[in-house]
Amino acid sequence: MSRFGSRALQRWDDEEESDVDDLLIIAGLLEGSKRNKRKKKFRGSLPGRHNVPRDILGGHQRIYLDYFADQCVYNEKHFRRRFRMYKSLFLRIVAAIEF
């Protein structure tokens, strides 16, 4: 065996554990980079899709006017059917949370 071959075998024996650790680290880094490539590269709305304006504040205003205003549109029966609880119970829960 040549001098280079014997030196390489000796070095392999001495550094075998650190080489295995290095290989495991490299394998982990490669797997992590594969996962990053598979990740979606965008956040939020999907590209090519249109945004639907939902008027959230207007919805809140309509619910308030329909069920909680002094001259509400729907009565207690409608409130119970929609929210599955009596209006008085709902108002007690709101009062307990606010206090």
Image: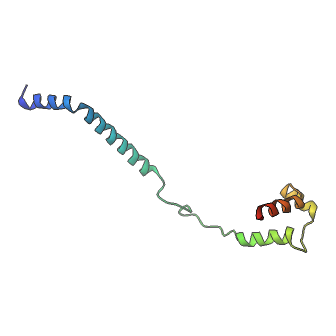
Q: In this view, does 59 lie to the left or right of 17?
A: right
Location of residue 55 (image quadrant) = bottom right
Q: Which residue is farthest top?
A: 1
Location of residue 81 (image quadrant) = bottom right
Q: Total marks drawn?
A: 0
Location of residue 23 (image quadrant) = top left
Residue ID at (36%, 45%) = 29
Q: In this view, does 20 lie to the left or right of 63?
A: left
Q: Which residue is farthest left?
A: 3
- Between residue 68 and residue 30, name the one nearer to us: 68
- Picture quarter with the C terminus: bottom right
Q: Which residue is farthest front?
A: 99
Q: In this view, does 39 lie to the left or right of 13?
A: right
Q: Which percent across, then down, holds residue 57?
A: 72, 72
Residue ID at (89%, 70%) = 73
- Between residue 99 and residue 75, name the one nearer to us: 99
- Between residue 67 and residue 44, name the one nearer to us: 67
- Picture quarter with the N terminus: top left
Query: Residue 38, relative to residue 91: is it above or below?
Result: above
Q: Which percent across, then down, holds residue 47?
A: 53, 63
Q: Is residue 25 left or right of residue 11?
A: right
Q: Which percent across, then down, holds residue 8?
A: 14, 32
Residue ID at (85%, 61%) = 92
Q: Which percent across, then down, holds residue 2?
A: 6, 28
Query: Residue 8, relative to residue 59: is it above or below?
Result: above
Colouring chosen for the image of the structure: rainbow
- Between residue 91 and residue 56, name the one nearer to us: 91
